[in-house]
Image (tube, rainbow, N blue to C red):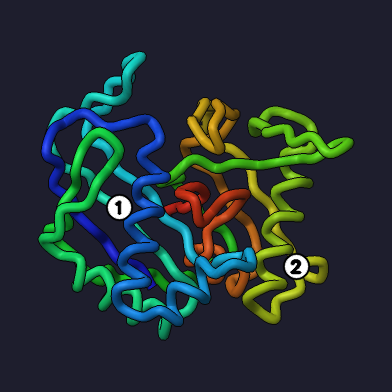
Amino acid sequence: MRISLEFELDTNSIDKKYRDGIISFFKKAFSTNDKNLYLKYYGETYSVKNFTFAVYLDSPKFTPDGIVLNSNTIKVNFSIFDACDGIDIYNAFLKMRNVKYPLFNNFMTLKRVKIENTKKVSSNAVLIKMLSPLIVRTNSNGKNRYLNFKEDGFTENLNQSVKYVLDEFTSIDLSARRFEISPISARKTVVNAFGSNITANVGVFKIVADVEVINAIYQLGIGSRRSEGFGMFEIIS
């Protein structure tokens, strides 16, 4: 299930940690609508989440102090695997319409909420475009390292991440299924996340996998930190 949100900002300048502000808004919306919904996703015990999101910024210009946009609008695309929770979250967002909410040194007001059509994939080969950067993480000796698509271990570590998420939310065993990803028109980027700048990947990739796998990860997202605004993609062909 996919939901689109459109926010109006007080000014066209936002903090580089804007994703943290969006997550704060989610927490407020969930808790306002249903305490159990909030506890399920943001309770004291960490849980792997079955959603991802992407933030669209209008012609962003990065400065030492933040990000300057071309307009006072930001859009958020939200995708969740569980349709029942998706309806509850949609209702939670509706309750937050026209409420001015802090976004670091700015304020944002939710103006529009819409349930979007979710594509049903019937092919085992698709082209995808990353709507939010793809993060692939590896860990060695307790230290995280983030890979770009040209580095050794990119595909292996991404496959492990996809398998982990599918094991959590589906009955699909990726070890017995095909899953391949390859860059078509991709590039490395650097994003501000977890308090530091890290390597990520954007652009167009090709996925070859079982139809069930593609349909699941289309809603769940791929890679690390999906629920923090990374790994959401659109199917373009």
Q: Give the left or right position of residue 111, taking residue 208 as reference.
A: left
Q: Give the left or right position of residue 150, taking residue 187 as reference.
A: right
Identified at 65% across, 62% down, the residue is: 209
Q: Could you classify mark 2 by the number of other residues whose Cα lies within 10 Å: few (under 14), some (14-19), or many (20 or more)? A: some
Number of the front mark, 1 or 2: 1
Is 154 rendered above or below residue 4? above
Determine whether the residue tagged by mark 2 lies in a helix, strand or loop: helix
The residue lying toward the viewer, choosing from 149 and 13, is 13
> What amino acid type is highlighted by mark number 2?
Leu
> Which labelled disc corresponds to residue 174?
2
**Where is residue 73 drawn, in percent x and y?**
16, 42
**Where is residue 30 drawn, in percent x and y?**
36, 71
> Which labelled disc corresponds to residue 76?
1
Identified at 11% across, 39% down, the residue is: 10
Q: Quadrant of residue 83?
A: bottom left
Q: For the residues marked 1 and 2, what is the alpha-carbon distance in whole angstroms?
A: 30 Å
Identified at 49% across, 50% down, the residue is: 228
**Where is residue 203 drawn, in percent x and y?**
47, 36
